[in-house]
Image (cartoon, rainbow, N blue to C red):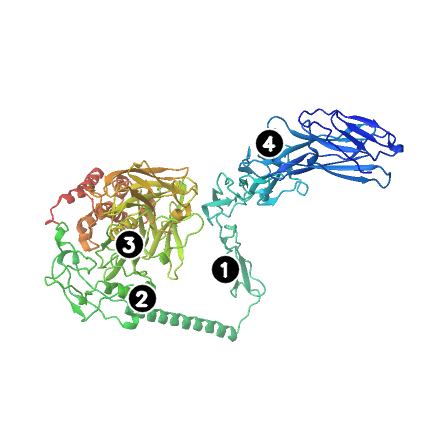
Amino acid sequence: MPLHLGPFVRWRSGLVLAWICLFSSGFTFTDGEHAVTVTHPLPAAFSDLLPHFLVEPDDVYIVKNKPVTLTCRSTPATQIYFKCNGEWVHQDQHLIERDVDPATGLPVMQVKIDISRQQVEKIFGLEDYWCQCVAWSTTGTQKSQKAFVRIAYLRKNFEEEPLGKEVALDQEILLRCHPPEGVPPAEVEWQRNEELIDPKTDPNFFITVDHNLIIKQARLADTGNYTCVAKNIVARRKSSSATVIVYVNGGWSTWATWSACSAVCGRGWQKRSRSCTNPTPLNGGTSCEGQSVQKSACTATCPVDGGWSEWSKWSPCGADCSMWRSRECTQPTPGTGGKECQGLDLQSLNCTSEQCPQTASGAEDVALYVGIVVVALCLTLLLIILVLVYRRKKEGLDADVADSSILTTGFQPMGIKPTKPENSHLLTIQPDLTTTTTSYQGTLRSRHEVTGKFSMSNGPLLEPLPNGSHTLHNGKLPSDPNEFMNRLSSQTYFKTLPRDNVNTSYGTFNFLGGRLTLPNTGISLLIPPEAIPRGKIYEIYLTIQTKEDMRLPLAGCQTLLSPVVSCGPPGVVLTRPVILSMDHCSDACLENWAIRLKKQSYEGTWEDVLQLGEEVVSEPYYCQLEAETCRVFTEQLGRFALVGESLSMAAAKRLKLLLFGPAYCSTLEYNIRVYCMDDTQDLLKEVMQMERQLGGRLIDEPHVLLFKDSYHNLRLSIHDMPQAHWRSKLLAGYQEIPFYHIWSGSQRTLHCSFTLERQSLSTCDLTCTLCVWQVEGEGQSFTLDFNISKDIRPLDSDFLLMDNCTPALAGPSAFQIPYLIRQKICSSLDTPCPNGADWRLLAQRLKLDRHMSFLASKASPTSVILDLWETQHFHSGNLNQLAAVMAEIGKQEAMIFLVSDGEC
């Protein structure tokens, strides 16, 4: 029978009045207005059961505008409906399904309703929207659990995002993340470089309850970009990436063993090193603090060569008519790698007939002795013949030049033997001879007549003739100045001789000596009188090597302290040392340096010829180190350089700092070039000439900076510019020149450029401060304040190049002291005086005490002292001062300085 249901609920009031009447054949619902008759009553066996829920409604979320469905299922149930927020849902909104449980035969009812976003929003903010299912049976009713219906969302912005960090290796890292507000609450996960982090597979990661990420021990592999990801059923949000850098601070390795002592014998140095590799700094970690190299002075035990003891007495004559004597290698015994004794340690000798116990006589013994004597005489005669032949051939190789009394009557006729082409000798480069004899008549001019000096100007010994030509022993002076260099370059040893006429001086000299000078370089060569043997005439040159391929190789902590200077030709015979003067850039503090003079051999290798402070007077080289100049006494010409090796970090080189700017600036940009170079005049001249070609000019006075062997770089920066008018285009705060670029000296003209930009072309006044300093060392600053378009300061390249001396001077014009007066002084002071008024007192007055041993080893100590005085005072020498020194000594020869030129 069909079941007729009528309205039994009064909907808006929320009040339900239901009276249920049970009948054996049915039941009726009534609310006073309607009555419903149930025609299918429950079976009698289950009429006393209350309904229970097979499916209860669960909490749901509305995503965007999609409605949600609530489901409820109950048995045994006769009716089932939803109530939401205390109000019954209209029956038209229910979808009811009826069924019978096949196992029990009980009726099963299922009901569904849809909840829209609008329904929930009507009460949003007051309380949560909820629904509950109510089921009826003949026995009574049952209510299900409440199901809450919420609108799902996830806001865009994180309440707290992770921040990047830099941490050291093995430290703990905490990255915070507070996800955006959302319903349902967002789930959080972490990503590294867009890959999901799973703490289960990598226990080094841990995600806390409040969504923070903890890295327990930072590893290098943990460096990366970390992202916090929040998601729910609505959306998925990603935080901004946090960069985590795991850095490694550098650590020193253990010190290596000390190196062998640099000196084979005597004082030297040794070093040991360590590296910043334990560990190596990574990802911006700090470098190791301290020095990577340690130096220490050392003293090497000198090798001892063995020496023979005295011979023992002869032994008695033996039965074989011989006697013996011996000696031992014990005075001294060889040690420390020294040489063994050379020669025999045992000697035998035949006894005379009287001493021999077995007398032997006969004609055969006499014949033997006669034969030995004849052979000895033949060998002696042959040796004498060979010596005579060798000496005659050697005399044929040299040109004999005979001159007479050049001091008083000028050059007299000279006889010259033509030299055979095949016997051209390296020691004397002969002029181009056309006849065998000639003469030059005339007297030497007084040395005080400046215009009458033998001004070589890279020319010959004699002064120009009136017609402008030059004559010398029937030789022709090359019309082209480069012809002399071409002649030298044709020799095997001089293939590398530069043909730069600017950096080379040359001249022809005889026994009167002379002087070669490279203007504005501080380099000169003094050839004292009598240094060239009488009868010899040499063409001598002086040049400075500037090509990179001519730089000598340096090892370890060595540094070049002077220019590389060549004088020659090598191999010429000198009877006295010449003096080579050249600048150096050391601080002249010998306790911090091991300074060596190097000379290039014929094979091209560089050899140490002396170490300053350990000179041997018997050697052909000697050196005096002054504050800025080195004087080298040498009896052999060649290629020289001064090399220093620091013994401590207090050793310092002098650097010359020069600032250049454009002479004319028509653009907005203005470039300042800062040169940092060794403090020697030859480099100063080179930079000046280079800047002149670039159109630059000096914009401030040069400064000197002491650059120490501390392995720290040189930094340059510019400050205090008016920001309203100027700005620097340098991106970093400073520029830096590496230490080894400066210390090695391999780059002659190191410089940095600062590009400044003015706001308009009308801005011409520039004010700034430029600083140059060595890290943890000395510094210098330049304060600039000038007008770049109207700079009238007298600072130009010519300001520092004032040496206008003649490149070559020969004869008396090359010396301050006249030749005859010099001879009188030497003869007066060379002889030892009981009261000490001799050359030793002169050396003391001129502060040459340190060189007493060297001076005493010379045949004429006074002449060497005067040679040194000439090199030091050629431009500024005052003969009256030297005369005053002579007067203090008590010599009457002091008065000769006041003699007039005519009397000399």
Q: Residue 547 at x, y = what percent?
A: 33, 57
Q: Earlier in the sequence, mark 4 or mark 2?
A: 4
Q: Residue 701 at x, y = what percent?
A: 26, 41
Name the residue beneath numbered marker 1: 343
Name the residue beneath numbered marker 4: 121
Disc sitting over residue 745 in the figure: none
Disc 2 secondary structure class:
loop
Tell me how far mark 2 sits from mark 1, CA to CA: 42 Å
Disc 1 secondary structure class:
loop
Q: Earlier in the sequence, mark 1 or mark 4?
A: 4
Q: Amino acid at mark 3?
A: Arg
Disc sitting over residue 576 in the figure: 3
Name the residue beneath numbered marker 2: 491
Q: Residue at x 86, y 29 (%)?
A: 23
Classed neighbour count for the residue bearing mark 2: other residues with Cα under 10 Å, few (<14), some (14–19), many (≥20): few
Of 70 and 199, the residue lying toward us: 70
In the image, which is nearer the foreground, mark 3 or mark 1?
3
